[in-house]
Image (cartoon, helix red, strand yellow):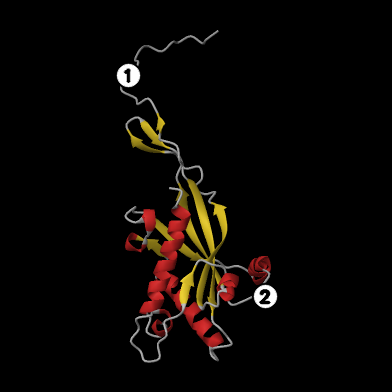
Amino acid sequence: MMSAIRDVSVSFLAFVEQMLRDDPHLSPYFDPTDPSASALGTMILTLDTPQEMEDNEQEGVSLWLYLVQRDEQTLNRPPRRVGLDQLERRPLPLRLHYLVTPIVDREVRTDAAELEQLVLGKILQIFHDDASIAGARLRGMLAGSGLEFFVRLEPLSLEEITRVWDALDKPYQLCVSYEVSVVPIASAFDPARIVPVDLVTTEVGPASLTEPA
């Protein structure tokens, strides 16, 4: 399905958002229905870049898909038989890389740095405890598909992550990178037609004792 990238991103975002809203320490910031007297619930999760969040004067978490790579390890898996005379064409397997950045307005909140670290710590805890997106967590066309996507914290060096911020033309901010894999982009072509094997016969006879000329 061509929507796999979008649907994985939406599933990733929805799962993290729900976990932040369910956390008693972060619910007042992310859940607009939180009953606490001091709750604001104005922080959001978005697929926008950190720069776009700041331009829109938004607070919360940016889950920015900054890199899409082909997964070489599963690229050459054999096609799947979907019928007696049909072979499903191989999907394009992808690895999606997300820059996860908490954004808190330092002009408004005196504890902005602490809050950013708290949010990031919670996200790290989420995927340390359960590093997959599957089942009821899947959204869009992926819902009910039975697929499972694994979320891995990437051990990027400061130099590698700084290059990402250079591409945004912004100074480095507190962030981590997560890889979600393997995301299949299905072929738009119909399954290939094949000729099924109806009968296999075995020929039995005396072997020649003479060497061939």
As drawn, 164 above or below 208: below
* Residue located 67% across and 65% down the image: 167
Residue 14's spot in the image, x, y percent? 40, 67
Residue 155's spot in the image, x, y percent? 57, 68
Q: On residue 171, which mark appears?
A: 2
* Residue located 45% across and 52% down the image: 3
Secondary structure beneath dot 1 equals loop
Query: Mark 1 is on which residue type?
Result: Thr
Residue 174's spot in the image, x, y percent? 58, 77
| Residue placed most toward the observer, 140 or 120 | 140
Q: Please state which of the two labelled residues, at mark 2 or mark 1, is closer to the viewer.
A: 2
Residue under numbered circle 1:
201
Position of 47 with respect to 11 (left or right) is: right
Question: How many marks do you count on the picture?
Answer: 2
Secondary structure beneath dot 2 equals loop
As drawn, 27 above or below 191: below
